[in-house]
Image (cartoon, rainbow, N blue to C red):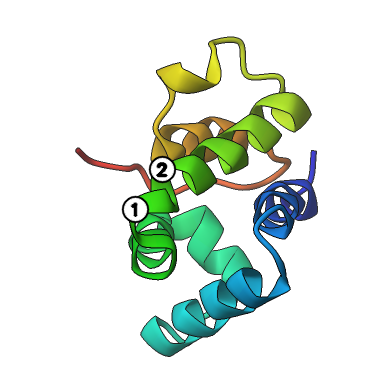
């Protein structure tokens, strides 16, 4: 697996909510942190979740579940989607990536 596969999981899940919502997400993320999207996904999942909440408000849980579902499918997560928080699913996927060491998530 490559970083690209994980990025595509997030991107495909956002596609489900339309171009405007997806663009709003990427714009909001870029305004909050001037770092490549890949870096945020790999190293700052908390920011990713915050931006999902900012953009999708009450629907952010549904969007997070869509992303988790994509990650589960591509990375072969064993538990049901409901057993994962987005940060956890991203961490599991990162550990399966070639040559990527994710920053540990603390709760």
Q: Are marks 1 and 2 in contact (CB under 8 Å)?
A: yes
Q: Is residue 18 above or below residue 32?
A: above
**Which quadrant would the C terminus be assigned to in this image?**
top left
Query: Going 61% across and 47% down the picture, which residue do you hit?
Result: 100
Query: Going 69% across and 39% down the picture, which residue do you hit?
Result: 97
Of circles 1 and 2, the one toward us is 1
Query: Going 55% across and 66% down the picture, which residue do you hit?
Result: 39
Left or right of 34 on screen, residue 69 = right
The image quarter in which residue 23 lies: bottom right
Q: Is residue 26 above or below residue 87?
A: below
Residue 96 seen anywhere in this rendered image of the structure:
no
> Where is residue 27 drawn, in percent x and y?
54, 84
Looking at this view, name the residue that lies furthest to the left. Answer: 107
Disc 1 marks which residue?
Answer: 58
Alpha-carbon span between mark 1 and mark 2: 7 Å
User: Mark 1 packing: few (<14 Cα in 10 Å), some, or many (20+)?
Assistant: few
User: Mark 2 packing: few (<14 Cα in 10 Å), some, or many (20+)?
Assistant: some
Residue 5 seen anywhere in this rendered image of the structure:
yes
How many numbered marks have been drawn onto this rendered protein structure? 2
> Considering depth in this image, is 22 or 3 the residue closer to the camera?
22
> Considering depth in this image, is 50 or 62 the residue closer to the camera?
62
> Where is residue 40 drawn, in percent x and y?
49, 65
Disc 2 marks which residue?
Answer: 61
Left or right of 64 on screen, residue 100 = right
């Amino acid at each position: 697996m490559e970083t690209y596969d994980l990025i595509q999981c997030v991107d495909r899940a956002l596609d489900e909510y339309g171009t405007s919502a997806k663009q709003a997400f990427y714009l909001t993320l870029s305004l909050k942190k001037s770092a490549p999207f890949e870096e945020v996904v790999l190293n700052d999942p908390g920011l990713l979740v915050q931006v999902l909440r900012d953009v999708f408000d009450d629907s952010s849980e549904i969007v997070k579940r869509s992303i988790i579902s994509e990650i589960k499918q591509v990375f072969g997560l064993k538990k049901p989607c409901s057993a994962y928080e987005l940060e956890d699913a991203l961490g599991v996927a990162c550990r399966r990536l070639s040559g990527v060491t994710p920053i540990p998530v603390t709760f």
